[in-house]
Amino acid sequence: DVQLQASGGGLVQAGGSLRLSCEASGFTFDDYAMVWFRQVPGKEREGVGCFSSRDGSTYYADSVKGRFAISSDNAKSTVYLQMDSLESDDTAVYYCGAGRPILSEISRPSGYGYWGQGTLVTVSS
């Protein structure tokens, strides 16, 4: 069975940092793009960043560029989201996903078929 286990969320002050982890199992990690989305209650799920373990390419939403960075440990089938200079607007439940999106779907939840359970990030101002 495919599983994505997200962890690392918590409470942090504005300006601080957190690192989220997403451990994948049940599929060939290198064959899938890994993605982070976030969602605030009452709002649509928002793409944060995408990572291709095959070639190391990344994509980031404008709202997090320069502050967030995605990396991976292919040996552990784990993708990370390093979040620096956190702002109150970054407060959300963060979800990791996996899929094979076409270019037009790279920032859309519909581009990914597998999702983790989410981890809550709360940034206090």
Image (cartoon, rainbow, N blue to C red):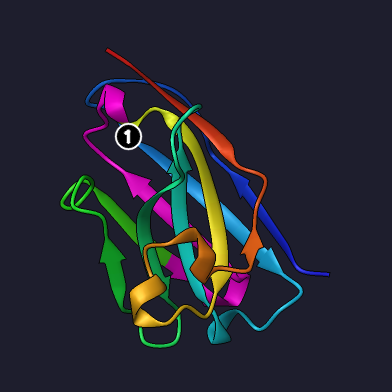
- Return the residue nearer the eye: 73 or 113: 113
Tell me the magenta residue range.
Answer: 72-89
Does the magenta portion include 79? yes
Residue 52 is drawn in which quadrant?
bottom left
Report the residue marked by disc 1: 17
Does the magenta portion include 42? no
Name the residue rendered at 33%, 32% in the picture.
90
| Residue 99 location (% of width, % of height) | 56, 74
Is residue 22 positioned above or below 93 on the image? below
| Residue 60 location (% of width, % of height) | 26, 60
Q: Is residue 41 left or right of residue 65?
A: right
Name the residue rendered at 46%, 62% in the picture.
35
* Quadrant location of the C terminus in the rendered image: top left
Is residue 54 positioned above or below 57 on the image? below
> Please, what is the three-letter code of the amino acid marked with disc 1?
Ser
**SS assignment at label 1:** loop
- Return the residue nearer the eye: 106 or 76: 106
Q: Is residue 114 left or right of residue 54?
A: right
Is residue 22 positioned above or below 117 on the image? below
Task: Tally the numbered discs.
Answer: 1
Name the residue rendered at 52%, 65% in the picture.
110
* Quadrant location of the N terminus in the rendered image: bottom right
Name the residue rendered at 25%, 55% in the picture.
61
| Residue 49 location (% of width, % of height) | 35, 59
Q: Report the residue that reaches farthest toward the top.
A: 125
Q: Is residue 39 left or right of residue 97?
A: left
Q: Report the residue that reaches farthest toward the right.
A: 1
